[in-house]
Image (spheres, rainbow, N blue to C red):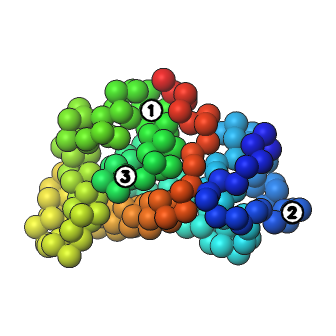
Amino acid sequence: MADETLPTALNLPMVDPLPEATQKYFDICQDKLGLIPNVLRAYAFDIEKLDAFTAMYNNLMLAPSGLSKLEREMIAVVVSSINKCFYCLVAHGAAVRALSGDPQLGEALVMNYRVARLDARQRAMLDFAAQMTTASATIEDADRTALRDVGFTDHDIWDIANVAGFFNMTNRVASATAMQPNDDYHAQAR
């Protein structure tokens, strides 16, 4: 790894040496992304926690879904924007730019998704994710109906809720530990 500094403000060094399966996962990240995300390095002090985190992330963000990878990344950015999570805004903002091919979309979602050029489906999805983040107890049948009205299935609504919920959790962990994004994210897809 090029950067051996701790990825958070906590003194929790990575297990050394990493178990073979973890090292293989990190090698895949390095090959595919050109880096090992600091969030993985942060969790690598406890391999069971890292495995639980990566299993949930991979299921929510990469498994088959009625939501595209871009839509899931858009949710991550909007939730992270509301929560002001520096790590996730940088990392997932880069993913939105790369997946959409539209740097303006990535920037708009980081700053204020309401100014982004979105279709009705994307707007409803992000409005729901924002409501979950700011006032989840106010969600009613009408809010789910608004998603159905633009073509989301109940399975899709489950996925929207779970992606938004996951990033609300990870945003809080990242902020509480001063998790730093990899420098490489800042220049990606610009």
Spot occupied by residue 104 in the image (x, y as percentages of width and height): 34, 27
Q: Is residue 178 visible?
A: yes
Q: Nearer the viewer, residue 127 or 177?
A: 177
Looking at the rendered structure, the kind of residue marked 1 is Arg
Camera-near label (1 vs 3) is 3
Name the quarter where the N terminus is drawn.
Answer: top right
Q: Which residue in the structure is indicated by mark 3?
A: 84
Is residue 140 rendered to the left or right of residue 27? left
Q: Are marks 1 and 3 in contact (CB under 8 Å)?
A: no
The structure residue drawn at horizontal position 10% and vertical position 67%, both measured from the top left corner, is 142
- Mark 2 lies on residue: 16
Q: Is residue 153 left or right of residue 5?
A: left
Query: Which circle's residue, 1 or 2, is located before the other in the chain?
Result: 2
Q: Which mark is residue 142?
A: none
Residue shown at 65% from the left, 53% from the top? 7
**C-alpha gap between disc 1 and disc 2:** 34 Å
Label 2 environment density (alpha carbons within 10 Å; few <14, some 14–19, many ≥20): few
First along the sequence among labels 2 and 3: 2
Residue at 21% across, 54% down: 127
Discs 1/2, front:
2
Q: Position of residue 186 (x, y in %)?
A: 53, 33
The image's mark for residue 97 is 1
Between disc 1 and disc 3, whose residue precedes? 3
Say if 114 sits above or below 154 in the image. Answer: above
